[in-house]
Image (cartoon, rainbow, N blue to C red):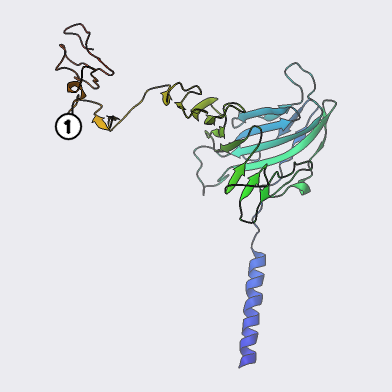
């Protein structure tokens, strides 16, 4: 009986092993082969109707970050704007293939973005070598990477640029920043960084739109849509509230004067009015809106203010 059970168990193990090895392996997108021309590099479109986003960096920083609509050839010129060859050295490229906006996961075609990458080397204005597909992998560490580029301590904390991480993720450097980019069509890249190195600020910058969304300066002042706050809170734009405001702990409704709250106008000679009709007890006219000390003291009778 034991021998029969052992044979059944061994057979079951062999069957499961064969089934597991027969399943197709999950692999990264096929290596995208670039077309090297005399004065440019082209990347062929493998997915009809898909847009592309190409990023190129090299010896002098970023050279290109551009979106190409579907049907437009994805090309990088080896000449600068003056028609001169680009600097010699190694250039890294990243190409994001984006499905059509109307295409949803599960439909035929490309169901999600594909990210291809590689490098090429330029000498004398021509591409002389490129990355071997064998060198690609899930984790790549380039030769010449600085010490402590990535450091994981015994507590599982990750340091980028430091061997003594003080949090789950610790990023240090002379001009540190954290980038988050949505590669779908219409997505933006956001950068969490200082306005400029050494100014003690921290802000969220929309790199795609070229705008600052918010910033806290070295004095603790907060700016919304501005990088130069001049008070505790500086807003460049309109403010909308659905609940009203609190002034010295008392509510000031957005519309209708002081309904349901203690009127500040009766407390002292420095009156504060806010909302349509606020301050009507002290002034003439209709549809008055006042905000600030002594607001509403001077107006033209009978005219909305």
Furthest residue in direction top, as rendered = 300
Tell me residue 122's x, y (percent): 81, 30
Whether residue 197 is situated above or below residue 141 in the rendered picture: above
Residue placed most toward the observer, 245 or 27: 245
Q: Seen in the image, is 96 located left or right of residue 253? A: right
Callout 1: helix, strand or loop? loop
Q: Is residue 72 visible?
A: no
In the current view of this chain or complex, which residue is farthest to the bottom? 1
Give the left or right position of residue 231, taking residue 16 as reference: left
- Work out whether 110 lies above or below 36: below
Which of 47/78 is in front? Answer: 78
* Residue 4 position within the rendered picture, expressed as x and y whole percent measured from the top left: 63, 90
| Residue 191 picture quarter | top right
Provide residue 77's location: percent of width, then percent of height. Answer: 73, 25
Q: Quadrant of residue 51?
A: top right
Q: Nearer the viewer, residue 6 or 107?
A: 6
Q: Quadrant of the N terminus?
A: bottom right
Classed neighbour count for the residue bearing mark 1: other residues with Cα under 10 Å, few (<14), some (14–19), many (≥20)? few
- Image point (26%, 27%), residue name: 254
Q: Residue at x 18, y 29 (%)?
A: 262
Please give the residue where the numbered disc 1 appears in the rendered image: 260
At horizontal 19% and vertical 8% (from top left) the residue drawn is 303
* Quadrant housing the C terminus: top left
């Amino acid at each position: 009986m034991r021998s029969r059970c052992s044979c059944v168990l061994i057979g079951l193990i062999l069957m499961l092993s064969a089934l597991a090895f027969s399943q197709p392996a999950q692999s990264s997108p096929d290596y995208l082969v670039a077309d090297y021309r005399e004065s440019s590099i082209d990347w062929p479109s493998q997915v009809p109707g898909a847009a592309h986003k190409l990023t190129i960096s090299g010896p002098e920083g970023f050279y290109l970050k551009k979106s190409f609509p579907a049907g437009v050839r994805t090309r990088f010129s080896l000449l600068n704007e003056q028609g001169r060859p680009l600097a010699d050295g190694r250039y890294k490229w990243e190409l994001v293939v984006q499905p059509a906006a109307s295409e949803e996961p599960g439909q035929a075609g490309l169901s999600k973005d594909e990210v291809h990458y590689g490098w090429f080397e330029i000498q004398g204005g021509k591409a002389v070598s490129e990355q071997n597909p064998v060198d690609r992998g899930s984790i790549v560490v380039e030769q010449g990477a600085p010490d402590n580029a990535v450091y994981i301590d015994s507590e599982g904390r990750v340091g980028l640029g430091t061997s003594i991480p003080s949090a789950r993720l610790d990023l240090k450097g002379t001009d540190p920043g954290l980038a988050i980019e949505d590669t779908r069509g219409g997505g933006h890249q956001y950068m969490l960084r200082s306005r400029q190195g050494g100014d003690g600020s921290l802000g969220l910058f929309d790199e795609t739109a070229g705008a600052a969304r918010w910033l806290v300066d070295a004095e603790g002042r907060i700016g919304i849509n501005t990088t130069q706050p001049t008070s505790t809170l500086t807003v460049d734009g309109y403010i909308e509230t659905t609940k009203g405001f609190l002034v010295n702990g008392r509510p000031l409704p957005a519309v209708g004067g002081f309904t349901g709250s203690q009127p500040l106008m009766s407390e002292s000679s420095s009156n504060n009015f806010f909302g349509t009709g606020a301050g009507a007890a002290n002034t003439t006219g209709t549809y008055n809106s006042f905000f600030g000390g002594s607001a509403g003291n001077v107006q033209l009778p009978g005219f909305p203010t």
